Amino acid sequence: MIVVELRKLFRRPRTWVTIGLLNALPVLVAVLLAWTDLAPRPGEGPAFLSAVLTNGTLYPLAALAIVLPLFLPIAVSVVAGEAVAGEAQGGTLRYLLARPAGRTRLLVAKLIAVVAFVVVTVVVVAGVGYVVGRLLFEVQPTGGTALSGTSLTSQELAVRTLLAIGYVTVSMLGVAAFALFFSTLTDSPLGATLGALAVLIASSLLFTLDAASSFAPYLPTRYWLAFVDLFRDPILWRDVVRGVALQAVYVVVLLGAAWANFTTKDVTS
Amino acid sequence: MSTVIGTTGLVKRYGQLRAVDGIDLDVRPGDVYGFLGANGSGKTTTVRMLLGLVLPTEGEVRLLGEPMPKAARRVLPRVGALVEGPAHYGHLSGRANLALVDAAGPGGSRRTRRARIETVLEQVGLAGVGRKPARAYSLGMRQRLGLAAALLRRPELLVLDEPTNGLDPQGIHEIRDLLLQLNREGTTVFLSSHLLAEVEQMCTRIGVLDRGRLVLQDELARLTSPTGATIVETPEPDRVRAALDGRVLSVTAGRAVVRGADPAEVNAALVAAGVPVHGLALERPSLEAVVLAAARTSSDRVDAPGERSRR
């Protein structure tokens, strides 16, 4: 079942088109920066972008920072929102369940396929960012500079980049959990996707509002950019740990709700 | 195992509405069971409850002797289903679709998969379909592919909802022959339909659903057994009344209905009286008459609130 779902997802041209489009923006930004040599000043624009001109090995992180606020969540919401509702809309859900695929199994397989998509997407963005960074910018053989000003060995930098990829993946799992839950509620994949995006937009908006500060720490997007802290010296773990814990709570609660809803629901699509 | 599909007091309530209102289905091995009912009478909801897609509010479903939906994982691989039209992944070919659905559940051996797919495509007449994606199929081809998916694991029971939908007359004939052949080989067929002619031609037993209730369930042969009257075709029906006074039930243009279950005896009496006889036949009720007598109104008809009290 899991293999079936993975095959369905990755054999679909649309999946690769989405991943391809997702990489277009960071590549465009890299080309523009290399062309004009005009990097944003430190503290402005997406994280890490100010540093990439002098050190191309930071570009995977800059690429992730560029797609993180909007593009990546959209791609994840589309795929996760499609998971169950797409099958319902296409009518294939009733045949999968009458096969019988088993409702819990189907949901788990969908979840694993979505996780695989998130991992593949984040890794591809980072990978493309790495290649682009090596090709277009100067590379310091000794490693990079931490945001705090001290220098990192290339080994340290590699480890921290992997940690950052992992952290972004975890953040996206929260988005996936929202979309998957909505996907079990409706027969319209578009509705599920937009529902998840609405949650994220509301969360980003409330985060900027002082009046909402009492529950700001619990907003799903609150710690998304905390992966930047992995590049301070020493690493500032506080927000990273909180971010992972918060996403874990969202994932567990929403998947529980998705499971409870899907296994007791009348499939009339 | 005496019943293939057995339900007891099956109820599905949606809010106030009782879509299925306490039905007791009894489908036996070897039956071609025609499940008849107007649109909206609860046929599809019932079929979905049989397959565990919709969960009953009350009552029990037993499929191949096992409780549903509890034993779904054991039972459903032995059941082939076509529910409310076929559905496929449009970007994949017919073969890829069949392989994917077969791999999605238990009971379909991987080693035999390829051979099974070729066999069923042959059976439904899609053997030469090639690599064309399913979204490019015609309605009839999709219906055939849906049927192929239902046949993929040589099921003991086929649950088919309007299986000839979208097929042309030749296609309908082919599929009917295929289903009857499978039935002769031991497959029980549960056929949900509102096409009386289709059911009359294929089925051995029928159940009639009217607004969620099973108003009739019996052998087709018994329901349409002779009524004990003989139909006489004659250019002079009025003379039949004179010849067989007191036995004539009705007279219409060119035809008289006479009491008596022996056409030969009726014929002899008429010929002796010099009445010209063109044809004689035992009177049988048509399935249509039987169904209409059992289920009175079309359920997609929506009457004003006052008239609902007749229920």
Image (cartoon, coloured by chain):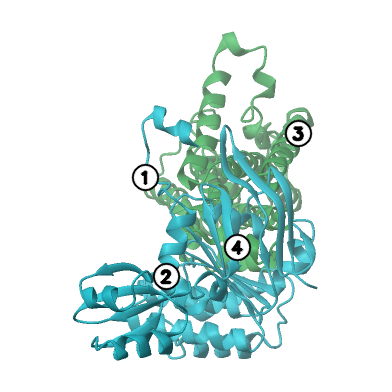
Chain colours: A green, B cyan
Q: Tag 3's secondary structure?
A: helix
The disc label shown at residue A187, or none = none
In depth, the one of B229 and A123 nearer the eye is B229
| Residue A6 x, y percent position in the rendering | 63, 64
The residue at the point 48 percent across, 74 percent down is: B228
**Mark 3 vs mark 1: in front:** 3
Instruction: Please report, as a chain letter, where disc 4 is located.
Output: B
Q: Tag 2's secondary structure?
A: loop
Instruction: Please report, as a chain letter, where disc 2 is located.
Output: B
The 10 Å Cα crowd at callout 3, few under 14, some 14 to 19, many 20 or more, is some
Instruction: Please report, as a chain letter, where disc 1 is located.
Output: A
Residue type at mark 2 is Ser
**Mark 2 vs mark 3: in front:** 2
In depth, the one of B138 and B284 nearer the eye is B284
Circle 4/circle 1 CB separation < 8 Å: no
The 10 Å Cα crowd at callout 4, few under 14, some 14 to 19, many 20 or more, is many
The disc label shown at residue B217, or none = 4
Residue type at mark 4 is Gln
In depth, the one of B224 and B124 nearer the eye is B224
Can I make out residue A83 in this image?
A: no
**Mark 2 vs mark 1: in front:** 2
Circle 4/circle 2 CB separation < 8 Å: no
Instruction: Please report, as a chain letter, where disc 3 is located.
Output: A
B118 left or right of B249? right
The residue at the point 31 percent across, 90 percent down is: B272
Same subunit under labels 3 and 1?
yes
The 10 Å Cα crowd at callout 1, few under 14, some 14 to 19, many 20 or more, is few
Circle 4/circle 3 CB separation < 8 Å: no
The disc label shown at residue A249, or none = 3
